[in-house]
Structures are given as structure tokens and as C-alpha cells.
Image: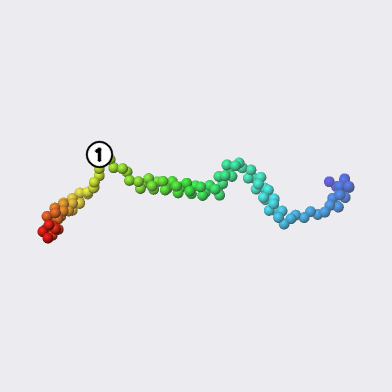
Amino acid sequence: MNREDDQPLWDLLGKAVKPEASAFFARNVLRKIREERSGRGYLARFFSGRRLIPAAALAVAMFAALIVTRMLMVPPHSKENPVIAAVATQDYEVVADLDELLASDENNLWTDNSSL
């Protein structure tokens, strides 16, 4: 476009004031761009990293607590075959010695109070 083609337009442009951008122009432009990009739906905003990470950590902690409590629960004993004591084969001699000790303790004279 030449100056001679449209002289009144060039005269009007010559009178125009030079625009000055504010100090926050770049920040405002970037904010508008981000707002347009974040046109995601409600669910996408709800499941953002800011909320999803703590919620996932809480779910993992609750699941671990559930597993630990299930592992610590003692299974109920059946009434037909109650478990009194489980003795290993190497402990049979110790159990036999304890039986002898209990039998000798019943015949001990020092614990009999009737002779006093």
C-alpha cells in the first residue's frame, strides 16, 4: 500500500497516539492463554495432581492398614480339636523332665502344712 493510495487513512494514522503496554501485559496474556487451554471438564479438574496424589496416598495407607489388621487376626480354634500346645520333637525330653518334676513336687514334705 502506497501513501498516495489512501491519503486520509495515512493522515489519521499519523495522528494516532502510540499505545503503551502495561507492565503486566505479558502476564495477562499468558493467563488468558492458560484459561483457554484449561477448558477441561469438571472431572479433569477434580482429578488434578493437587488432589489425586494425597487421595492416592490415603487409599494406599488404608489398604495397608486393612492388610495388617487381617494378618494379625487370630483364626478361631475349632471346638472339635482344640490346640493345647504344639511341642517340637526335640522338646519331648524337656517335657518328660517337667512331668517328673511336677510329680516329685506333689510328694514334697516341705510344702505339706498339715505337720506343723
- Percent of width and height locating residue 29: 69, 50
Please identify the quarter of the rendering in which residue 106 is found.
bottom left
Disc 1: CA contacts within 10 A as few (<14), some (14-19) or many (>=20):
few
Q: Secondary structure at mark 1?
A: loop
Q: Amino acid at mark 1?
A: Glu
Q: Residue at x 69, y 52 (%)?
A: 28
- Percent of width and height locating residue 36: 66, 45
Q: Residue at x 74, y 55 (%)?
A: 22
Can residue 37 be seen?
Answer: yes
5 or 38, nearer to the observer: 38
- Percent of width and height locating residue 58: 48, 48
87 or 75, nearer to the observer: 75
On-image quarter of the C terminus: bottom left
Image position of 26 (left or right of 111): right
Q: Residue at x 87, y 45 (%)?
A: 6
Image position of 75 (left or right of 96): right
For the rendered model, the colour scheme is rainbow
The residue that label 1 is drawn on is: 80
Image position of 36 (left or right of 7): left
Up-down relation of residue 52 to residue 111 (above or below): above
60 or 102, nearer to the observer: 102
Can residue 93 be seen?
Answer: no
37 or 80, nearer to the observer: 80
Image position of 80 (left or right of 34): left
